[in-house]
Image (tube, rainbow, N blue to C red):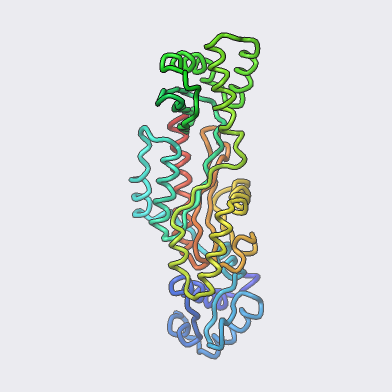
Amino acid sequence: MEDFLDRRSQRIFQLIVDSYIESGEPVGSSTLSRRLSEKLSPATIRNVMAHLEKIGLLYSPHTSAGRLPTEQGIKLYVQGMLDIGPISDIDRQILESRFDFGGRSLDDVLEEAITTLTGLSQCTGIVTAPTYNSPLKHAEFIYLSPGQALVVMVSHEGMIENRIMSIPEDMTPSHLVEAGNYLSSRLVGKTLDEAKAYIKKELEFEKDQLHALAKYFVEKGLAMWGASEAMPALLVKGQSNLLNAAKTSDDVSHVQRLFESLEKKADILQLLDSAKQGEGVQVFMGANSPLFHMSGCSMVVAPYRNSKHDVIGAIGVLGPARQNYGRIIPMVNYAAKLIEKFFNQNK
């Protein structure tokens, strides 16, 4: 940083970014002169601002003398000037109070995580759930009514999937229990992919009613689950927060186009997948993805790992480019660590 900007330029630039994060408004040389601890005239400050604008860190949004940081400037601020401390005690206590792991499914934990992040950050919370292909801990088949059954799958990592599936109209509760017990004894300890392959092979030449029902479950029920799904689940909360942060009609239009992209899911999933390749919290802005082009938004995201330390998902917040990175980065990082704690408790 010292090679790029001298101390005076760094201080003035940091004050401009801090002011932008606080108010979203341009700041001028007279205001900066009053806020600086060292005595500098507005004319001297204007010269520094002109240099910062020339090298692409500031811009003037209109004819006013005030300046705002560019996307490149915000990136420089986050990567080279921002002092990221630990999460605040209040934010930590709120997150911990909402992470009650007792008897809860992973879906519940992820839902609670992004709901809490959304409330604390006043941004949009985003999380990807891992694909369901870990070893099974429990499988249960429950008769609901003629033609319908509930199938409950619990993985060793605590992920629970409840699915209602169609069954033959003439299947009785006792038939279901018998077929369910047969399948459970062979499903537990295997991933869904392994279970499907094993059971299909075992039942290939069996012809009695029990095996016919078990085969039906495998072919009509399990085959549409888990790793066969094309994309991991994406949970999004608090989209209205982005609209509330929009200042002009153009801002609203850009955010609405961002929502359209979120509906398609592919772009955001690709971005979250790239976040899973890195270490720790990452910040994505417009140049990182077409998703943020012209939207004035950025995303702070952290990967989370299972009990085997494999990265299996990511959680983060999507907000305006002027979001409070010093507070939100440690908050997102801590939420990811709490999700990892859930996996360690359920291994």
Determine the residue positioned at 60% across, 37% down.
Answer: 229
- On the image, the x and y values in percent for residue 125 come to 47, 54
Determine the residue positioned at 62% across, 80% down.
Answer: 53
Determine the residue positioned at 50% across, 22% down.
Answer: 168
Horizontal side of 113 relative to 57 (left or right) equals left
Q: Nearer the viewer, residue 258 or 220?
A: 220
Q: Nearer the viewer, residue 56 or 178?
A: 178
- On the image, the x and y values in percent for residue 298 come to 55, 62
- On the image, the x and y values in percent for residue 141 come to 45, 22
The quarter of the rendered structure image containing the N terminus is: bottom right
- On the image, the x and y values in percent for residue 96 come to 36, 45
Against 126, is 174 above or below?
above
Against 194, is 332 above or below?
below
Against 158, is 168 above or below?
above
Residue lying at the far front in this picture: please name it. Answer: 169
Q: Nearer the viewer, residue 316 or 171?
A: 171
Q: How many marks?
A: 0
Against 40, is 13 above or below?
above
